[in-house]
Image (cartoon, rainbow, N blue to C red):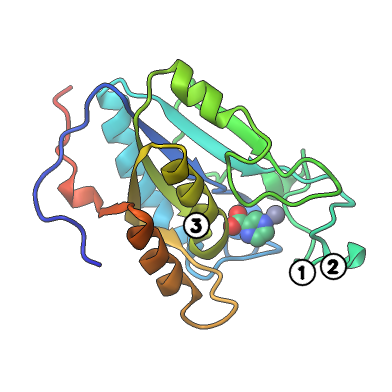
Amino acid sequence: MSADAFPMSLHAGDALLIVDLQSDFLPGGSLAVPRGDEIIPVLNGYLAAFQQAGLPVLATRDWHPSDHCSFRPQGGPWPPHCVAGSAGAQFASGLKLPVDVIVISKATDPQRDAYSGFEGTELDHLLREAGVSRLFIGGLATDYCVLHTVRDALKLGYQTLLLQDAVRAVDARPGDGERAIVDMLKQGARAVTLNHIRMPSP
Ligand code: VGL
Ligand code: ZN
């Protein structure tokens, strides 16, 4: 499960995809992911590398209507979170997204949930249009939206790298996050950590 030990260069065709790094998923938020805030500085490191290399950055956001079916008052499993336009739906304030970040809103339909950033969105189309073939994916939460986004990326034929140092899990059942990582690697994702990315020269 350890990340590959050799340094890795970024090149044309690579893109960084940050999953649901939103206030409601951080400590103090309505659906806080334990230690979710720890990955912000790490993601800022990946962001610097991708920006220096002139490569695209995309960010998904959970963007629910206030009566979304996944919310407990509607019979769903989750406390209300990431209501479109609310403070809790904002990207983490410390996250240094580039001005030209491509934002993908998902799970906007009141009647259905969508854990994958590809589900019901333009994500695949946008990536193909941009000539992306290799996707670096990190964010929240390992055992839900990261897991489903990585699975779909693999199914759609992207070389998929899991940012092992830039994900955190809900762990509703202890071990869910670890099992999700094992699952993603088994499906064909590779694990990478920031210290293996060769920083492009400015
Ligand atoms: C997520 C639970 C509910 C996630 C979104 O981003 O992983 N988890 N909605
Ligand atoms: Zn949600």
Residue 2 picture location, percent across and down: 21, 65
Tell me if the residue at label 2 has its CB under 8 Å from ligand 1.
no
Q: State the residue position of label 2.
A: 72
Vertical arrangement, residue 2 with respect to residue 41, above or below: below
Q: Position of residue 166 (x, y in %)?
A: 38, 55
State the residue position of label 3: 147
Q: Is residue 161 left or right of residue 127?
A: left
CA–CA distance between discs 3 and 2?
22 Å
> Residues at badges 3 and 2 in contact (C-beta under 8 Å)?
no
Q: Residue at x 52, y 36 (%)?
A: 59
Is any part of residue 87 visible from this angle? yes
Amino acid type at image mark 1:
Pro
Question: How many residues crowd mark 2 within 10 Å: few (<14), some (14–19), many (20+)?
Answer: few
Q: Amino acid at mark 2?
A: Arg
Give the residue at mark 1. 77
- Ligand 1 within 8 Å of the CB at mark 1: yes
**Considering the image in quadrants, where does the C terminus appear?**
top left
Q: Amino acid at mark 3?
A: Leu
> Local crowd at mark 3 within 10 Å, few (<14), some, or many (≥20)?
many
